[in-house]
Image (cartoon, rainbow, N blue to C red):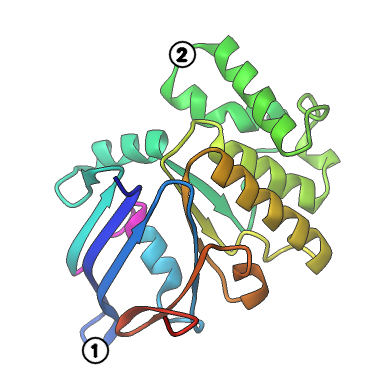
């Protein structure tokens, strides 16, 4: 079963401007797909639809076999908490929590076992090379380290799908390359599917597939 299955997706802004139509997308567990496109073409809107934060005008989205359309807001929130991980350009690390507490946050929202959450957070921090930084705070971390924390947090609850929006946009090129390699490795090792929106062809280079978003949907960046 695909981690995400999208069929016939369409979305317009207002009455005049169509972002895309007839969009189809399937992503397998362990596969990383990069979405490229011009500014304003609807890349972030598409991510919001995949996350159940916005509704399409037409079409269907299935996450790990669950159809999003019929779900109410409470059910969508539960799905996001349990089956989706998020990596953002702005990190969104909470400064008043320790690094380990930030990573464990998705588990705290879905499971009451604090000891298990702490142990799992430690595993993920070790996986991203920050096993000795769990008791520190965000103010002591570099931008690259903060993004590694964000990756650990996105994967800690073993989601079916990772959604990443310009995940290295705030990093210098050398740090971005290291973080991207880590992101790809950790995502595949966890068996998650990942959809990464970016404007950078270099960033997209870590992906298994690169797709271009335009008004007609998604097409292969390599013409295949």
Q: Is residue 76 above or below residue 218?
A: above
Q: Earlier in the sequence, mark 2 or mark 1?
A: 1
On the question of residue 56 being in view, the answer is: no
Q: Residue at x 44, y 18 (%)?
A: 111
- Is 14 placed left or right of 178 in the picture? left
How many tags in the picture? 2
Q: Real-space Cα distance between discs 2 and 1?
A: 48 Å
Q: Nearer the viewer, residue 190 or 124?
A: 190
Q: Is residue 126 above or below residue 184?
A: above
Residue 212 is situated, as x and y percent measured from the top left of the image, at 45, 79
Q: Residue at x 33, y 52 (%)?
A: 4
- Is 136 placed left or right of 85 in the picture? right
Q: Quadrant of the C terminus?
A: bottom left
Give the residues in magenta: 49-57
Q: Is residue 55 magenta?
A: yes
Q: Quadrant of the N terminus?
A: top left
Q: Is residue 215 above or below residue 108?
A: below
Q: Which residue is mark 1?
A: 16
Q: Is residue 185 magenta?
A: no
Q: Residue at x 78, y 53 (%)?
A: 143
Mark nearer the viewer, 2 or 1 = 2
Helix, strand or loop at disc 2? loop
Residue 210 is situated, as x and y percent measured from the top left of the image, at 50, 72
Q: Are marks 2 and 1 in contact (CB under 8 Å)?
A: no
Residue 199 is situated, as x and y percent measured from the top left of the image, at 58, 76
Q: Which residue is mark 2?
A: 112
Specify the farthest residue to the bottom.
16
Helix, strand or loop at disc 1? loop
Q: Is residue 171 above or below residue 74?
A: below
Residue 190 is situated, as x and y percent measured from the top left of the image, at 54, 38
Query: Picture quarter containing residue 206?
Result: bottom right
């Amino acid at each position: 079963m695909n981690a995400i299955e999208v069929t016939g997706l369409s979305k317009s802004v207002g009455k005049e401007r169509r972002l895309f139509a007839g969009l189809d997308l399937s992503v397998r567990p362990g596969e990383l797909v990069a979405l490229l496109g011009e500014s304003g073409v609807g890349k972030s809107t598409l991510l919001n639809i995949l996350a159940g934060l916005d509704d399409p005008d037409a079409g269907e989205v299935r996450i790990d076999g669950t159809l999003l359309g019929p779900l109410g807001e409470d059910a969508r929130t539960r799905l996001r908490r349990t089956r989706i991980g998020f990596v953002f350009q702005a990190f969104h690390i909470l400064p008043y929590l320790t690094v380990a507490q930030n990573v464990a946050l998705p588990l705290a929202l879905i499971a009451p076992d604090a000891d298990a959450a702490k142990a799992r957070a430690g595993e993920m921090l070790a996986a991203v090379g920050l096993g000795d930084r769990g008791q520190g705070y965000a103010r002591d971390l570099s931008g690259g380290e903060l993004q590694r924390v964000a990756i650990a947090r996105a994967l800690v609850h073993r989601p079916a799908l990772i959604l990443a929006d310009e995940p290295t946009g705030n990093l210098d090129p050398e740090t971005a390359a290291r973080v991207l390699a880590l992101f790809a490795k950790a995502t595949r090792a966890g068996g998650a599917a990942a959809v990464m929106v970016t404007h950078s062809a270099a960033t997209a280079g870590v992906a298994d597939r690169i797709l271009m978003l335009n008004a007609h949907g998604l097409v292969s960046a390599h013409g295949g």
